[in-house]
Amino acid sequence: MPAANLVSAEALTVVHGSRTLLDGVSLGVSEGDRIGVVGRNGDGKSTLLRLLARQQEPDGGRVTHTGGLRMSVLAQADALAPGTSVRDAVLGDLPEHAWASQPRVRDVVAGLLGDLGASDVGGLEAAVDTLSGGQRRRVALAALLAADPAGELLVLDEPTNHLDVEGVAWLAQHLRTRWAPGAGAMLVVTHDRWFLDAVCERVWEVHDGVVDAYEGGYAAYVLTRAERARVAAVTEERRQNLLRKELAWLRRGAPARTSKPRFRIDAANALIADVPPLRDSVELARMATARLGKDVVDLEDVTVARGGRTLLDDVTWRLGPGERVGVVGVNGAGKSTLLGLVNGAVQPDGGRVKLGQTVKVATLSQSVRELDEVADLRALEAADRVAKHVRLGDRDVPAGQLLERLGFTAQRAWTRVGDLSGGERRRLQLLRLLMGEPNVLLLDEPTNDLDTDTLAAVEDLLDGWPGTLVVVSHDRYLLERVTDRQVALLGDGAVRDLPGGVEEYLRRRAEAKAAQVAAPAGGGAGAAGAGAGRERPAADGAAVRAARKEMARVERQLDRIARTEEQLHAQLAERATDLAAVTELDGRLRALAAEREELELVWMEASELLE
């Protein structure tokens, strides 16, 4: 039975000033859809969401909802009433015993409001007027999720803004759990590519007045878009060849009979078969050593205390030439302080910071106030004022070419800096830093205000940058893409290496939280362990063997599903222009996704017996 259609849009047209954001767009949202919306800043993603939620009227076309449709909408701007407390905004008039007895609501409060002290009365009684923008954002998201919108259409506009790595992972898990197959539909605008892969099963790309649909998460979207671009390039080349032949015929008469060229569309994986590694780490390290020498930055027995808290406690940490390090950690653990020690903005209370003689540090801060002094210049002039060329790898790149690589068209390159959008100002800020040719680059939340295409361009630019790179970011995809190792600040004053990357950080955080919960309840580690033993008796040998057999059986089936899905995605890329075939393949992929989720639940139940 086909899924019920919840929202239908027919020939939507929206004109903003002299620009057409949407030009006759028709699409629909069905029961069970998990759709991520991507596109360049200003191309109409939020406009599309408002239209589908009927919060904005189109200039042309119409939107219809199925009868009785319930929607929950998280807009970019929160609508928290002034003077409201966090408790009232999230929980309404529910007494504490009522919401505390609901695991779902407790999970939302702990997952999103932990940094407000939501475990005690003071945190929940705080007025929303006193909160930061990021905290208000999390309160608005918590209020929406605590209302249990399962079974309806959930519309989220940038839900991961102001969430740290742990918060994004929590939100993804929460949405996957609450929106199991058949539990309503979800429409999400986000620039977080890891989140797209973790939550969404389809992607809509808004660009140039149209909306292109892709099956799968971000990774599948990139592959399919690349394949479509290749097919389009082949088609255009064929058209040009035909035009040249036509011109030759007009000049020379009828051409001799020739066989028609044959074109074959390879599987999507063939697109990346001959792609070289992202970056030549050996060559970059060699160039970085030549520019920096062997000593870059050494933190030796450093201690930093702020506001009665010790952020760093007797830390020794060394950065070498060409190292690319990602920094993750809980809010307030000292990530920005660590960057401040490297660039000299923060002085240690104990120990010393030693910089190499040739070190030249540049920092991309979270604000863009550095551009205020060039607000009246054109973007290209602001870049040229720093330098005309920059050395990237083994070649000189002019400022204009760098602007183009970062998404500035010829027209936008000659736009006043003061008139640029937030994302454009962020890109220009990074470009000006690179034009100064630093050899140590510190990036503090560099993904703010950047769309997915721009993020990819920034990552490509950093791939060829020969120097030491330190990135503080909540964007898990970016960290794993541009850095070679990650470290964590867990709030205990230490800087810890993460051999297992962000996944290891999340595991350590989960273990720390579990220990905090178990300690007061059981009066110590031994009591907690005993309590856990009483709560769930150990499984006998026969049950354990049966569980292992069941897990092995499920894993074989999951492998089969993965192979089948890979084949179907390849067929989808080959037959992208055949609507009937795409519809049939889409149905098969949905069925496999549902089967995979059921098998994963079976596997998890069996694995619990082995814990």
Image (tube, grey):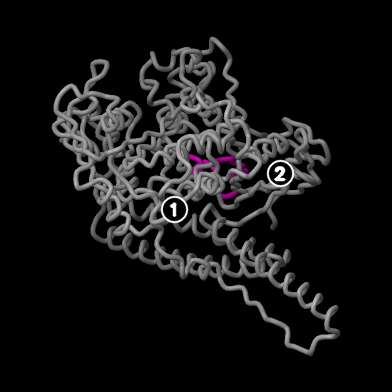
- Look at mark 1 in the image and give the residue it sits on: 601
The magenta segment is 174-190
- Left or right: residue 6 versus residue 218 is right
Name the foreground residue: 332 vs 168.
Answer: 332
Give the percent coordinates (x, y) of residue 473.
Answer: 39, 38
Task: Look at the image and tell me in which quarter the N terminus lies.
Answer: bottom right
Looking at the image, residue 67 lies above or below residue 265: above
Give the percent coordinates (x, y) of residue 600.
Answer: 44, 55
- Look at mark 2 in the image and give the residue it sits on: 6
- At 79% from the left edge and 89% from the top edge, which residue is drawn? 256
- At 68% from the left edge and 70% from the top edge, which residue is drawn? 237
Name the foreground residue: 103 vs 80.
Answer: 80
- Left or right: residue 151 versus residue 359 is right
Dot 2 or dot 1: first in sequence order is: 2
Which quadrant of the figure has residue 173?
A: top left
- Is residue 326 in sight in this rendering? no
Dot 1, how many residues are within 10 Å of its Cα: few (below 14), some (14-19), or many (20+)? few
Residue lying at the far bottom of the rendered structure: 257
Residue 365 falls within the magenta-colored stretch: no
Residue 177 falls within the magenta-colored stretch: yes
Give the percent coordinates (x, y) of residue 145.
Answer: 53, 31
Is label 1 in a helix, a strand or a loop? helix
Give the percent coordinates (x, y) of residue 283.
Answer: 31, 59
